[in-house]
Every structure is written in structure tokens, then in C-alpha cells.
Amino acid sequence: MDEAAGAEEPVRCPVCSQELPPSRINAHLDRCLQPPAVPCHNGAPGSPTATAVPEEGSHSAKKRRLSPNAAPFPLFHKQRPGGEGASCPALSASSPSPAAGPTPQPEAGKSIPEKLEGKPLADKMRPTTLEEYMGQSKVLGTDTLLRSLLESNEVPSIILWGPPGCGKTTLAHIIAKNSKKHNTRFVSLSATSASTNDVREVIKQAQNEQKLFKRKTILFVDEIHRFNKTQQDTFLPHVECGTVTLIGATTENPSFQVNTALLSRCRVIVLEKLSVEAMEAILMRAVHSLGIRVLDRDGHSDAEDGNSSAEMPVYIEEKALSTLAHLCDGDARTGLNGLQLAVQARLAAGKQSFSYPGTKKSPKSGVIIMEDHVKEGLQRSHILYDRAGEEHYNCISALHKSMRGSDANASLYWLARMLEGGEDPLYVARRLVRFASEDVGLADPSALTQSVAAFQGCHLIGMPECEVLLAQCVTYLARAPKSIEVYSAYNNVKACLKNHKGPLPPVPLHLRNAPTKLMKGLGYGQGYKYNPMFKGPVEQDYLPEELRGLNFFKKTH
Ligand SMILES: Nc1ncnc2c1ncn2[C@@H]1O[C@H](COP(=O)(O)OP(=O)(O)OP(=O)(O)O)[C@@H](O)[C@H]1O
Ligand SMILES: [Zn+2]
């Protein structure tokens, strides 16, 4: 599509975005690609949200044209996930050995504090190959479809759906790096900051690229669920015609959040929380690349004590690593951040002598990171609960169902899971108000009063004091008798209105008010029996004529 562009139409330089006549583009490109040019990628001023990945081969220490920030790949050398330690370049810090692969290694030879400077550890440790990518074997294992597609460079448009820090962005980068070998561009946008215009811009460039160089573009859109439906529609024709291959990432269920037309053109790949084993491997790799020594239960270190330079050695207990792997709830970013914070805090505390209880090993001196230190490094709210995502809906649903099942015990558990995870107490309180009417109803009308009072109380005093108010109300509601009589009767009425064919029946004349003479003349209010004037029961119809005899309370569904 859009291939009809006339010969005279200017083309946009894919490197610096300048518009040029087609006859001049090649000469311009030669100049534009000259080292040492200033940063010349589409993340230059004007479109701060787009970042192009440097081409393979240009990404070397000598002739890097892009600003270091534009390079999505970590500066770390390739690491074995295992841990014999002796050959780890970071441990034998004396020579900045070039032996460990094609990537430059500016980190080798640095001290641990120096290695922790700058970008967060999680970014620096981002894997660049499938071999370094841990876990997710269900979708990426050796015999999976995705794996074979990737290896043959036939990347379909995909949506990666998974919890935070499970490796969505990382996988997209790996796919891109993989496909660059096959002449593909990679551009990334974040849906949180990119406008529809940014999207159009990227697509325009992708079209030029295809025209000029027959190069494909992979467009990575992080948090794709944040794009509204119109913005999502902007992609659609271009995904369809193959100008761009879309890789979207989302923490939200795409069947609710992503435009169905777009969804039907993408494969949804479900990534899971990382397992404890995968987390341990990720942490171990980080520890080794930092040059931290792992102490096993007997106090043995995985590196020789003899070769320590002037730098003070840093040790971490094996147990501390496994605790961290358990606590970060499958979120590698949280895990790596936790590790980084613990290491930094301990480095700040300085060198100590420590001996290992219960062993004959002689006391060591240096910095030691123990289980308690990593626990401090982790924020509790990160551990339990993902306030914005799936978990939020799953937990409130579990609470609602536990109360409905009159299980006060389980109800309190789900309540605590949410509140301890940092859930907004008013969100829970609103649900309780709804429950009081929907599930308790007239079996105990004061449930509504109770829950509204709890809502107002929470509003007044906030967390953490209001937690007990919610606990009280949750228990009250769980123990209360249940009736859905009103709820289902009202639903029956709504269904009746929805299914009604033709114009709705008029309001019966005798039920109408007659404030004017004209209305009285028209028969409004005529024959209405004012109930207080009658001694016994009054015979009178209140439904429109065609509905007479219908009982919404009796109808069951
Ligand atoms: N499967 C993995 N193997 C190794 N490291 C991983 C893996 N997943 C995540 N990481 C590490 O965690 C960091 C964060 O991961 P990433 O940015 O890919 O998460 P995400 O799923 O995109 O999260 P979010 O939804 O929060 O953006 C990475 O920089 C990397 O260091
Ligand atoms: Zn240019």
C-alpha cells in the first residue's frame, strides 16, 4: 500500500529524518552515515519517544555513532549462568581480556561500586541472546513454534502478555537483535508517551525504508494497552500489509484492552512470572558479573581468596540469593533492584570481619550480604501484589466470592492480600457497598448501612488505620444471611425493557399527574384511587396494560 508515491516525491532519510529529493538520497546517506557523526537516530530531538537500535556491525567500541543511551544492549560481557567463578573475567579483574565474545567490555577491571554506577543493574543485565534469557520455556522452549519462527527470522506480529519484569521488553530486544542479522530495523515506542503523530512518523519511515532498502521494520510498543483504540487503529493497515511487524507488550489481559481487529492479526504470547529457579539463575549471573563471591552454607566461597586485589571483597550468602529469588515474586526487575540496593547499602556500611558460625573456616574480612540485608532491599508492596494489573482483579473477585460463600476466614485473607499489597482501601470499600446490596440484600438490610459506614470511615482515616474497619465489614458481610431477591428481580426488569419490541407502552393515564386544566381534560389522573382514602385493600393496576400480571420477583433465571 502507499506504494504509488510519484518519482518526484521527496524521501525521508531513515537516519536523520531529513526530507530530500530521491536523486540526492544516496549521496546524503553516505554523508549521514559517516562516523563520527553526532547522534543521528530517530530518537533525536523532536521525537523523544522513539529509539532506533544501531545496526549490527556499527555497534563497536571504535566507531559507535549512536549515543550510548540509544544502545539497548548492556555493556556487560556474556556470562555463564552457572557459577564456578574462577574464569569469570570480573573476578580475575587484572586484565581487561577481550576473549569473551564480540561485545566490548568496559566493565571489566572496574570495582564493584563502579559497576553499580549509572544505569540500574536490571538494565545492565538485560540478556541479549535467547541463551541468556531464563525461564518462559512454555513459549520459548526448544520445540516451540515461537522459537522456530525466531530462528528462521520469520517474526510474526505478536503481543507479549505477562506480569511486570517477566521479560517482555527483553524478549522484544532479543528478537530485534536476532532479526538485524537479516536486515531488519527495530524501533521502539512507549504507549505511555508516544502520540498518534509519533506512530505515523514511525510508519512513514518504515515505508521509506521498505521502498529504498527493502528493509523491514519491527515496531515495539511497550504498554500497548495504554494506546486508545484510535491510536491502535493507526497501526492496523501497516501491520496487515507487512510494512511493520508489531511487537506489543502489555501487563493487561489483551482480550479486554487491545483492539479486537489488531488482536486478530497478532499472536498473543503469554509469558509467566519467572520461576524461583529462573530467578536464581538471573541473580547468579548478576552476582558473577559484578564480581561478588557466593558463600555456601559452610562458608566456602566460590572464588579463591588469594587473588583479591586492593579492592575489598564482597560476599553474598547463597541463602540470601535464594531468599531474594523467592521474595521477588517472579519479577526480575524487582529481584535485581533488590540485589543492587542490598549491595550498595552494605558497601556503604564498609568493611567488616566476619566468621562463619559452625565451621572451621578462618574469619574473612570484607563486605558480606546476608538474608536480612536483601529483605530490607526489597519493598514489601512489590512482593505481593500488582495493583494495576490482573492480580488486582483476581483478588477482589476472590474476596467477593469468599464473602458470598460466607467464608469469613478466606475473606479476611483476600482482604489482607490486597491491603498489604498497597491496594486503595476505597476501591475495596466500594466493592463492599455493592456486595451489601447485591448479595446480602433484604436478608439483612443493615448490611448496606454497615458498608457505607465502612466506606466513609475509610475515607476519613485512610490507611493503615482503616484496615480494621474493612476487616469488620468484610466479616459482617461474610456472616450475614444472603438474598439476591432484589438483585435478580431488578435484573429481570432490565431484561424485560431490553427485550421489548416496538415502542414502550405509555404510562397509564390514571397514574399520571394532572397539574394543568389541559391535562385534566386529556384524562390525566382520571380514576386514580388515592390509597389513604380507602379502608381496605385497593384494586388498582400500576403496570402498563400489556404487562399486567407480570411478576419480576417470581421469574427465575
Ligand atoms: N527471562 C529473563 N531472563 C533474564 N533476565 C530477565 C528476564 N526477564 C527479565 N529479566 C531482567 O529483568 C529486567 C526487566 O525485564 P523486562 O524489562 O524485560 O520486563 P518486562 O516484562 O518488559 O516488564 P514491564 O512490564 O515492567 O516493562 C531486564 O532488564 C532483565 O535484566
Ligand atoms: Zn540523514
Image (cartoon, helix red, strand yellow):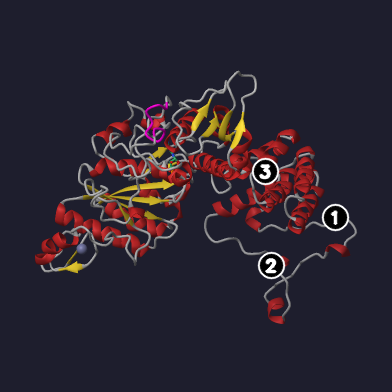
Camera-near label (1 vs 3) is 3
- What is the quadrant of the C terminus in the image? top right
Q: Which three-letter amino acid code belongs to the residue tagged 3?
A: Glu
- In reply to whether residue 481 is colored magenta, the answer given is no
Query: Closer to the N terminus: mark 1 or mark 3?
Result: 3
Query: Closer to the N terminus: mark 2 or mark 1?
Result: 2
Q: Is residue 29 above or below residue 253?
A: below
Tell which of 348 and 128 is nearer to you. 348
Visible residue check, residue 275: no
Identify the mark at residue 509; answer none if there is no mark. Answer: 2
Does the residue at mark 1 contact the one at mark 3 (Cβ under 8 Å)?
A: no
Q: Main secondary structure of the magenta part?
A: loop
Query: Closer to the N terminus: mark 2 or mark 3?
Result: 3
Q: Who's the residue at 78% across and 48% down the image?
A: 469
| Alpha carbon distance from label 1 to label 3 | 56 Å
Tell which of 322 and 50 is nearer to you. 322
Q: Is mark 2 within 8 Å of ligand 1?
A: no
| Quarter of the rendering containing residue 34 | bottom left
Q: Give the residue at mark 1.
A: 537
Q: Is mark 3 within 8 Å of ligand 1?
A: no
| Quarter of the rendering containing residue 95 | top left
Visible residue check, residue 311: yes
Q: Which three-letter amino acid code belongs to the residue tagged 1?
A: Pro
| Alpha carbon distance from label 2 to label 3 | 58 Å
In this rendering, position of residue 330 left or right of residue 479: left
Q: Is residue 525 above or below residue 469?
A: below
Q: Which three-letter amino acid code belongs to the residue tagged 2?
A: Leu
Identify the mark at residue 420; answer none if there is no mark. Answer: 3
- What is the quadrant of the N terminus in the image? bottom left
The quadrant of the rendered image in which ligand 1 is seen is: top left
| Other-residue count near label 3 (Cα within 10 Å), few / some / many at <14 / 14–19 / ≥20 | some
